[in-house]
Amino acid sequence: MQNSILRITEAKYWRLMKTKKNKNEDKPKNRVRKPQKSSIRNTDGGASKQKTDKDAHDTIKLIRLNKYIADAGICSRREADKLIEKGDIHVNGKVVTQVGTKVNPGDIVKYNGKILRGEKLRYLLLNKPKGFLVTSDDPQDRRTVMNLVEKACDERIYSVGRLDRNTTGLLLFTNDGELTTRLTHPKHGVRKLYHVVLDKPLLKNDLLRIMEGIELEDGIIKPDKINWVTDEMDKRHVGIELHSGRNRIVRRIFEHLHYEVIRLDRVIFAGLTKKDLPRGKWRFLEDKEINILKMI
């Protein structure tokens, strides 16, 4: 630190001397005073180093351990703090239990004996086609959504939530564990809008019943909005918006009232739309879209 102050002091001195010299160009050179030695002592015993080990260490950007864990796609920061407190995290071979600990990018961080990598965060939106499973691996070797995005990036990404095999539409992928937890937790009320095509027109009485809430085997479900799709004359086309993440919830709502869902397409997810995104294609999110998601 003292070396740094010394360099700043000397630099300031020479700027002043340069100004003074310009003002006194007509004066004899032998009258220019030599710079005085700085009164700041060099505590390294006179050894002159351009950059000490401490200076080099200070330039390394330390990362909070919980963020490092979350960036590796393991979990959210809050859940990472719990892992740290439990003693499940090792840094450079030692157990770390202090929440708030910071690590260097080069430190070896392990969880369950596995080295974690602080990866670049990726956010990818897929317009899922019909017939693809939402899973990272299928024992029966059926087609999965990972086949569609496997060449998108080097980082390992995961889907945020699920769509069943025959449901089409928007599916978000990321390695941001904290954002995934936020978007899938019911309390945040993430908006999901579906376009449903039924085997027969939806009766007004049934639409009102759904709007008021219906009792399913796992509890009452009440959508945020439901109505016929105005662009379609056929009342088999229904738009339903809800924030529940229950398994097959949209299909089960209509099956409860003896309708069969012929087609189910998720057209909006957390404010993201399918605009300019053909079926089976993907794109990376823009920075402004990522920022909006993180504000949820």
Image (tube, rainbow, N blue to C red):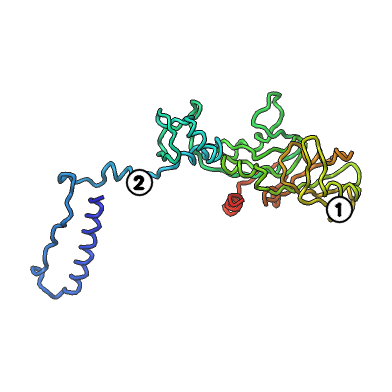
Question: Up-down: is 280 above or below 226?
Answer: above
Picture residue at 89% right of the left edge, 50% below the top: 235
Packing grade of label 2 (10 A; few <14, some 14-19, many >=20) is few
Residue 168 x %, y %: 75, 41
Picture residue at 66% right of the left edge, 37% below the top: 148
Residue 47 x %, y %: 17, 44
Residue 123 x %, y %: 59, 44
Q: Looking at numbered disc 2 in the image, what kind of residue is underneath it?
A: Thr
- The earlier-in-sequence mark between 1 and 2 is 2
Q: Nearer the viewer, residue 125 or 111?
A: 111
Left or right of 238 on screen, residue 5: left
How many marks on residues? Answer: 2
Mark 1 = which residue?
232
Residue 154 can be seen, yes or no = no
Q: Looking at numbered disc 1 in the image, what kind of residue is underneath it?
A: Glu
Mark 2 = which residue?
59
Which is more foreground, mark 1 or mark 2?
A: 2
Residue that sits furthest to the top in the current view: 139
Left or right of 156 on screen, residue 215: right
* Quadrant in which residue 102 is drawn: top left
Per the rendering, the mark at residue 91 is none
User: Is there a contact, CB below 8 Å, between mark 1 and mark 2?
Assistant: no
Left or right of 165 on screen, residue 110: left
Picture residue at 59% right of the left edge, 52% below the top: 295
Picture residue at 11% right of the left edge, 68% below the top: 32
Secondary structure under tag 1 reads: loop
Secondary structure under tag 2 reads: loop
Packing grade of label 1 (10 A; few <14, some 14-19, many >=20) is few
Gap between marks 1 and 2 measured at Cα: 61 Å
